[in-house]
Image (cartoon, grey):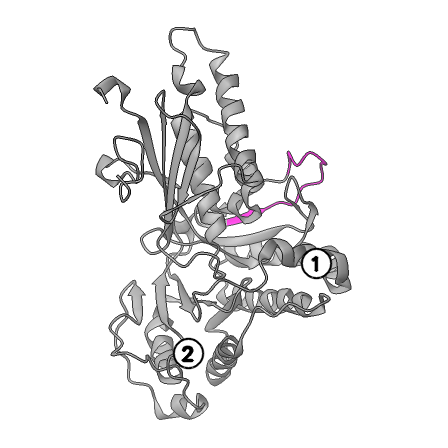
Amino acid sequence: MSGERCPRVVTCTAPVNIAVIKYWGKRNEELILPINSSLSVTLHQDQLKATTSAAVSRDFKEDRIWLNGREENINQPRLQACLREIRRLARKRRSGLEEESAPSFLSYRVHICSENNFPTAAGLASSAAGYACLVYTLAVLYGVESELSEIARRGSGSACRSMYGGFVQWLMGERDDGKDSLAQQIAPESHWPELRVLVLVVSAERKPVGSTAGMQTSVETSPLLKHRAEAVVPDRMKEMCRAIRQRDFERFGQLTMKDSNQFHATCLDTFPPIFYLNDISRRIIHVVHRFNAHYGQTKVAYTFDAGPNAVIFCLEQTVDEFVSVLRRCFPPESNGELFLKGLPVGPVTLSEELKMAMDMEPRPGGIQYIIITKPGPAPQLVEDPSLHLLGKDGMPKQCS
């Protein structure tokens, strides 16, 4: 392939976000319009991210996509919705350019390769990071400068929140066409530098009931979900925004736990009921409440998405001690070298009083590993061409 025939390649990364006010239920399945607003914390890409390379070339015969090393169906409707909208905006932009400056590659086929550095479909918002990364990468590739959160939402609802760093709200909107159902940043990642996030991986297995099917069944059968969307979430969103702006961890933590509990209560109120938490998940909840009761304040807070893995929020000064508590309650089955990943954790000797307060029968191997991270930035362009996932032939490097 000659130099001028080499594909044009762009690579970007995008973050995971963890909702502290949950999104569950759609009023429009095709446009992915939610029945309530939601709010999340964007996690740092040093620990958790999706990476996507996209390439265009006159030599490509068809659009193709590879996810985590496997070729997938490019005609999946949500994927096509994102690709179609980016191309539409690119053509619209091209129509305003002089013919000689307009990029000719808009008519070329695209190859896309994406991978996550965390378990896919295990309740770690993998689709949010994946679709945010896809949309951001395609936008850079095609030169689209637009409101991208609306496009990312068409792939996966919560993906719109991964288009921003820090603390982000997804406004449900009121319009039937979804043009006002957008993500907005409440505060940047630098706003609360002491905040830390612990991802407790209990299981990396695919969940038995996917989010799309689960929330559709909840909308159809759960009276509690309707009450939550209309009577609880609006006020809770205001309270959570206030707690974040004031860096009030006590309020932030309590709201986060209450909203997680109510989300899983709606799953139980669904018919037939949906069980995302397992026995280890429930034991983690007990550990958190015992730890907070020992100190007489909210020092750690849990939240669970649609899966058994826990996400713990705390301040930096609490990390070392609480990780020691988790080690005591859920001893690593191996030598523990791979038990902790991400930001460094120091050793702590637990007081006898705290040990008595946390007196529970240990569950060895209950937690597979812990990722320690913090709030992080929006999607990023990768400048180093050696990090492209696609080779000069436009194929995934591991396949080239």
The quarter holding residue 393 reads: top left
SS at badge 1 = helix
Query: Horizontal and vertical percent for residue 28?
Result: 70, 43
- Residue 28 visible in rendering: yes
The quarter holding residue 266 reads: bottom right
Q: Residue at x 63, y 43 (%)?
A: 32
SS at badge 2 = loop
Judge by depth and name the residue closer to the eye, 137 or 191: 137
In this picture, which residue range is highlighted in magenta?
168-180
Judge by depth and name the residue closer to the eye, 322 or 127: 127
Q: Which residue is labeled 1 in the image?
A: 217
Q: Does residue 38 lie above or below 197 as drawn?
A: above
Let me know if residue 46 is in the magenta part. Answer: no
Query: Horizontal and vertical percent for residue 83?
Result: 50, 32
Find the distance from the CA under tag 1 to the CA under tag 2. 30 Å
Q: Which mark is residue 366?
A: 2
Query: Horizontal and vertical percent for residue 277?
Result: 55, 72
Please identify the dominant SS of the magenta region.
loop
Label 2 crowding class (10 Å Cα cut-off): few <14, some 14-19, many 20+?
many
